[in-house]
Image (tube, rainbow, N blue to C red):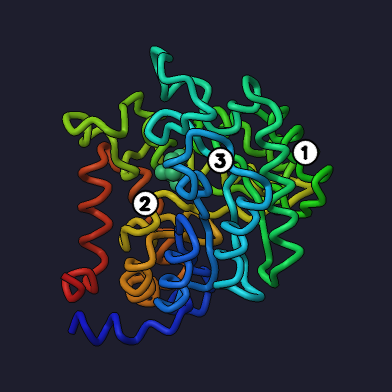
Amino acid sequence: ATASLLAEFNGTGTTADGHEVPLLANVGGGKDAEAAAKLGAQGVGLFRTEFCFLERDTEPSVEEQAAAYKSVFDAFPGKKVVLRTLDAGADKPLPFLTDSTEPNPALGVRGYRTDFTTPGVLDRQLEAIALAQQQSEADVWVMAPMISTAEEAARFASMCADAGIKTPGVMVEVPSAALTAEAILREVEFASLGTNDLTQYAMAADRQLGPLANLNTPWQPAVLRLVGLTVEGSRAEGHNKPVGVCGEAAADPALAVVLTGLGVNTLSMTARSLAAVAAVLKTVTLSEAQELAKLALSAPSATEARAWVREKLPVLEELG
Ligand code: PEP
Ligand code: MG
């Protein structure tokens, strides 16, 4: 049964009543992107650009960067590719951008914040993205990691505009960004929830520490509430901006249903999870997904949230 359920995947995410949830892939470079396209991804929801340069001691040139970005864009002609600007720091140090002596790297100069201490690198990256975009047919969206305030979002949007990039966005992975999503989304065109870091920061639990794994799950009702607040902010009066999820949460089929019920527009995940997520989504209607989201939000713990939702999704047993 598992094999046939998964074999039915035709590249789209749709609920039983026809509500579409584009399913996108998380990639780290051209090879990943080609593999994701073969597996049926409708585009890229998170291109982790820092993965192209983890081995580098020095900043890659604009031309070198443009070539790396183009290799991903070329795997998805005419499709959406959401590129994330360098997310250096904490679990992903880049020698040319980060200071390895920081006492608290997860709370340090990481992601967008590296522009405070090493100005110029982000501008040159945006220049490289614009160059790669001109040479390809992908629909390129660009987002900054670790945005904490509307002021930062506005500044990033203006840097993108200066570089000729038309679709700027932010990752929502710091609780302050979820809480101020309305103001942030006035400044940019879209948001993508990074549930890995959002969970780490909401629960004050290092995402790399095994003993904290029980705290560190996106099934935590507190995390789901932050997702809900972000969606609410995105639909505030006067605007209606798309919100995706690109953290590991999107790859958990039961959680993908909950996220859809919370109003998330797109789900981006490791490509090998696409078929399972699609198979589960098509067994529920949008209003059933909304009921499951309410159920998860009302649970007293992450364990119960997960168990209660899974119990209502019998297809999970078939998927094993
Ligand atoms: C996240 O934080 O959820 C995310 C998608 O980014 P990363 O895992 O690369 O930090
Ligand atoms: Mg992150």
Separation of marks 3 and 1 at Cα, in angstroms: 14 Å
Residue at image position (74%, 47%) is 127
The residue that label 1 is drawn on is 159
Q: Secondary structure at mark 2?
A: helix
Residue type pointed to by label 3: Leu
Residue 102 relative to residue 151: left or right:
left
Q: Secondary structure at mark 3?
A: loop
Q: Name the image quarter holding residue 80.
A: bottom right
Separation of marks 3 and 2 at Cα, in angstroms: 22 Å
Q: Position of residue 273 (x, y in %)?
A: 33, 66
Q: Is residue 116 above or below residue 138?
A: above
Residue type pointed to by label 1: Met
The residue that label 3 is drawn on is 86
Q: Which quarter shows the N terminus?
A: bottom left
Disc nearer the start of the sequence (3/1): 3
Q: Is residue 273 above or below residue 170?
A: below
Residue at image position (32%, 39%) is 220
Of circles 3 and 2, the one toward us is 3
Disc nearer the start of the sequence (2/1): 1
The disc at residue 249 is 2
Residue 159 relative to residue 234: left or right:
right
Q: Which quarter shows the C terminus?
A: bottom left
Q: Secondary structure at mark 1?
A: helix
Residue 110 relative to residue 318: left or right:
right
Residue at image position (80%, 38%) is 158
Q: Name the image quarter holding residue 221.
A: top left
Disc nearer the start of the sequence (3/2): 3
Nearer-the-camera pick, 232 or 32 = 32
Q: Is residue 123 above or below residue 250?
A: above
Q: Is mark 2 within 8 Å of ligand 1?
A: yes
Query: Could one spot residue 14 in this view of the protein?
Result: no
Q: Position of residue 196 (x, y in %)?
A: 39, 41
